[in-house]
Image (cartoon, grey):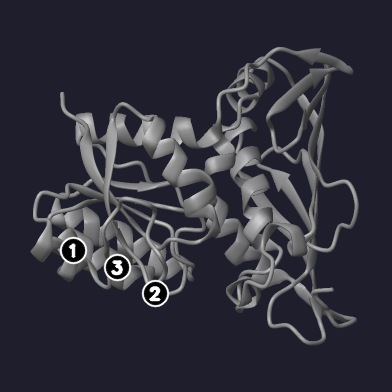
Amino acid sequence: MSATRIALIGIGKIARDQHVPHIAASPDFELVAAVTGHTPPEGVPGFATIAEMMAAMPDVQAVSICTPPRGRLALIEQAVAHGLDVMIEKPPAATLSEAQASARIAEKAGRVFYTTWHSREAAAVEPARLWLSTRTLRRVEVNWKEDVRVWHPGQAWIWEPGIGVFDPGINALSVITRILPRPLLLEDAELRFPSNRDAPIAASLRFADTVGVPVAVEFDFDQRGPQSWDIHVETDDGQLTLSLGASKMAVDGAAVDVGDEAEYARLYRRFAQCLATRTSDVDLTPFAHVADAYLLGRRVEVGPFHEA
């Protein structure tokens, strides 16, 4: 079969760092266009709108949306109206209601819709899920801490209401909701807001699964020095540790070989599978947990955030 002719919508840091090179390396896709207000990738024509792109290039078959979450519903409506299948970056939308509406719109139009969670495609996630499936959980601890200045330098959208530390934090939620055998229920949350920002820079979440296993989650967007993306799961038969964003796995301190295939290579392979079977892949569970955190979370004001 010939490669799917795909366009990127939104050409920012994540598109240039991950989507462009992995589409180029994929046998399943050909990057043929970009819809962006910025400079498109070299050799790829750029357009201001989806309608303008489709008028010039009606053979585009799918789009991958990499814009900030606010405003994606309108983009998805335009894409499916032009007969395009859709893949979107995380988080899927600005609100849970908007994400649910997007899924309904795509389904009604008969288009494939794939809400991606790139950290779920980290190399250790599936091995960890299988290892945990045969053991009894006792407790889970998550520490997901990074420096916003490194990963989102000067990006104002990251501080829009509802985002902040949950932009990286939702990656951790996407992993634990995949590897743990039972659903999670939020019991308590504290959200720490810089005095000069509209989104939290840190958060503490306390979950329990449906049989009462405690899950403690700590997010920090102001982690200087070494960055940490770690998950520890204590079971009746040893301790599982995922590190470096679930790309590494250890059991009782001993490393387990899980390979090193890149997350975005797996994402695009999964999208190709969805297209081949005409099947959507929509899981909004991690996003629902973020919404719950804002519903139950106590707001605590901390000192101002400064880029420098």
Is the residue marked by circle 2 packed among few (<14), some (14-19), or many (20+) residues within 10 Å? few
Q: Which mark is residue 53?
A: 1
Whole-percent x, y for residue 112 in the image: 24, 45
The reply to whether discs 2 and 3 touch (Cβ–Cβ < 8 Å) is yes
**Eyeballing the image, is 31 above or below 51?**
above
| SS class, disc 1 | helix
Amino acid of disc 3: Leu
Whole-percent x, y for residue 239 in the image: 84, 22
Q: How far apart in space, not on screen, are marks 2 and 1 (Cα)?
A: 18 Å
Foreground disc of the pair 2, 1: 1
Q: Is residue 7 left or right of residue 231?
A: left
Q: At x 61% / y 73%, what residue is drawn? A: 162
N-terminal-most mark, 1 or 3: 1
Amino acid of disc 2: Gly
Amino acid of disc 1: Met
**Eyeballing the image, is 212 above or below 107?**
above
**Eyeballing the image, is 227 above or below 268?**
below
Q: At x 62% / y 39%, what residue is drawn? A: 175
N-terminal-most mark, 2 or 1: 1
